[in-house]
Amino acid sequence: MYGMVWYGLTSEKRLRDAHARLKKRGVPLAVNQVNYSLIYRTPEENGVKAACDELGVTLIAYSPIAQGVLSGKYTPENPPTGPRGNTYTPEFLTKLQPLMNRIKEIGVSYGKNPTQVSLNWLTCQGNVVPIPGAKNAGQAMEFAGALGWSLAADEVEELRTLAREIKGIKMPIEES
């Protein structure tokens, strides 16, 4: 039997508390699903990723390509519409361009696109399973192209450094 929590444990304290409570009952906490991407690294910053690693809890990363932003689909001149446009503004997308340019350059060297590089960056973190949402078979095949290879360690760190420089996004729902 496995414990199931219907919302991600977005703080280290909540994660450790849930793990301890379930452990007392003999139920392992197997996974924790949280928002995590190259531009939304809150699980790294708030200790959730480190606690998952320590406790043997697999981190499931939802929105791993930041609602399509890390695919390269959106630019300052072509921002997303609807609710996404409130988060991923032309100003933010302008700040994102150096990171996107480097993602594209790295992708060329591996024969991969920005989506695949961004997903692979997550798998290179260890103990992370990204779950991108495929709208069709073509997208599913594209996502599969993130598997079977790995970014070099210096590329992983370079992308993290570039992402830090743009001051990643904040999601109000996860600020509590």
Image: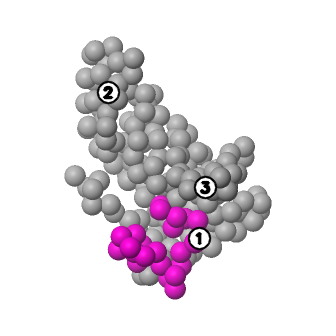
Q: Is residue 158 visible?
A: no
Which is nearer the N-term, disc 2 or disc 3?
2
User: The disc labelled 2 sits on which kind of residue?
Assistant: His
60 is higher (above) or lower (below) than 57 = below
**Residue at the disc numbered 2:** 19
Instruction: Look at the image and say whether residue 137 sits in the magenta stretch.
Output: no
Which is nearer the N-term, disc 2 or disc 1?
2
Residue 159 is left or right of residue 31, and the answer is: right
- Residues under labels 2 and 1: Cα distance? 37 Å
Instruction: Look at the image and say whether residue 79 sits in the magenta stretch.
Output: yes
Seen at 32% across and 60% down, the residue is 171
Seen at 63% across and 63% down, the residue is 114
Residue 131 at x, y = what percent? Answer: 52, 46
User: The disc labelled 3 sits on which kind of residue?
Assistant: Asn
Mark 1 vs 3: CB contact within 8 A: no
SS label for mark 2: helix
Q: Nearer the viewer, residue 138 or 92?
A: 138
Seen at 43% across and 58% down, the residue is 40
Q: Nearer the viewer, residue 137 or 12?
A: 137
Q: Is residue 170 visible?
A: yes
Q: Nearer the viewer, mark 1 or mark 3?
A: 3
**Residue at the disc numbered 3:** 136
Residue 174 at x, y = what percent? Answer: 29, 53
**Residue at the disc numbered 1:** 72
